[in-house]
């Protein structure tokens, strides 16, 4: 009973001394991840870069240009009914001439010659359907252009919101990693103390096994948090097209 009370007292003493000992120990290297310790690029710069690189946004903007050209085409569509027509032919042509000498006799003369024949003229057509439907066609082209612009805006809003969520998720994972790293550091310091007390026979085997298991779980949680943080960071970097130089602030 006396040994158990002594062990409990030592454990409480270890917990009380953890903060002081952690400041002096150099055996454990933990990644600092607090948002106050790191310099992430401004969220506006990240969003602008993501929008500039996104393939779907570029596709939507190109579609706007297509619809704008369609509208221009519809506005000048009427000119297809107005034009200049010209043709030319080369070959042997039969020519007939009439000759009269003032008397009652008339003479017809047929000749064959090789020559060029050509003609030039203007034409203007008035198709009723095109005239009546012209306004509807122009309005339809305008609506399609506005629709494509709205799709660009929708796509940009969607990507902007996704980027904001990923950015904030990265900050959250930084904070969680900081918490896990602090817990792991505390656990390792505590484990070192328990091992020393265990070798001196002051800590029971069951207690030593329990604390060892807790330390292993802390290390596993830390590695999982670290992996999730790196994945979130690399995904956002891939979308933005540049590497975040995340370094501890001075």
Image (cartoon, rainbow, N blue to C red):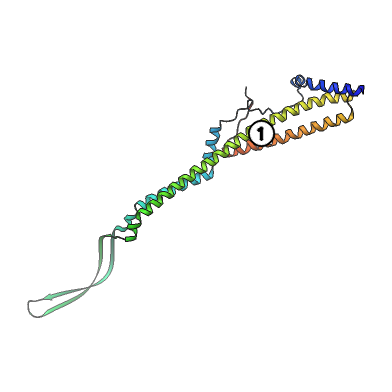
Of the pair 72 and 132, the residue shown nearer to us: 132
Tell me what residue is drawn at x 78 percent, y 34 percent. 217
Of the pair 236 and 93, the residue shown nearer to us: 236
How packed is label 1: few (under 14 Cα within 10 Å), some, or many (20 or more)? many
Q: Residue furthest bottom?
A: 104
Look at the picture and state if 107 lies above or below 191: below
Can residue 16 be seen from the camera position used here? yes
Q: Could you say where residue 42 lies in the image, as x and y percent from the top left?
A: 56, 30
Q: Secondary structure at mark 1?
A: helix
Quarter placement of the N terminus: top right
Q: Quadrant of residue 31?
A: top right
Q: Quadrant of residue 162?
A: top right
Q: Is residue 148 left or right of residue 190?
A: left
Q: Could you say where residue 228 lies in the image, as x and y percent from the top left?
A: 68, 37
Q: Could you say where residue 32 lies in the image, as x and y percent from the top left?
A: 68, 27
Q: Residue furthest right?
A: 1
What residue sits right under mark 1 in the picture? 173
Tell me what residue is drawn at x 68 percent, y 31 percent. 176
Look at the picture and state if 119 lies above or below 158: below
Tell me what residue is drawn at x 43 percent, y 46 percent. 146
Q: Is residue 140 left or right of residue 231?
A: left
Question: How many numbered discs, if any?
Answer: 1
Tell me what residue is drawn at x 66 percent, y 38 percent. 231
Quarter placement of the C terminus: top right
Q: Could you say where residue 98 lies in the image, as x and y percent from the top left?
A: 15, 75
Can residue 241 be seen from the camera position used here? no
Q: Is residue 126 left or right of residue 172?
A: left
């Amino acid at each position: 009973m006396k040994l158990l009370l002594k062990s409990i007292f030592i454990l409480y003493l270890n917990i009380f001394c953890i903060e002081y000992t952690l400041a002096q120990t150099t055996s454990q290297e933990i990644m600092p991840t607090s948002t106050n310790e790191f310099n992430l690029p401004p969220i506006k710069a990240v969003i602008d870069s993501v929008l500039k690189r996104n393939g779907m946004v570029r596709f939507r903007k190109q579609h706007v240009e297509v619809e704008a050209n369609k509208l221009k085409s519809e506005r000048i569509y009427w000119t297809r009914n107005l034009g200049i027509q010209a043709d030319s032919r080369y070959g042997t042509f039969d020519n007939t001439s009439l000759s009269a000498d003032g008397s009652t006799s008339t003479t017809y003369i047929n000749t064959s010659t090789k020559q060029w024949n050509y003609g030039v003229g203007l034409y203007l057509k008035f198709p009723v359907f095109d005239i009546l439907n012209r306004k509807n066609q122009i309005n339809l082209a305008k609506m399609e252009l506005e629709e494509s612009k709205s799709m660009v805006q929708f796509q940009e809003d969607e990507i902007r919101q996704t980027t904001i969520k990923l950015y904030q998720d990265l900050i959250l994972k930084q904070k969680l990693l900081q918490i896990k790293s602090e817990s792991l550091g505390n656990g390792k310091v505590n484990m070192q103390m328990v091992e020393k007390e265990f070798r001196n026979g002051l800590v029971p085997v069951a207690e030593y096994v329990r604390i060892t298991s807790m330390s292993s779980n802390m290390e596993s949680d830390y590695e999982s948090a670290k992996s999730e943080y790196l994945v979130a960071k690399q995904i956002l970097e891939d979308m933005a097209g540049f590497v975040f130089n995340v370094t501890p602030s001075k």
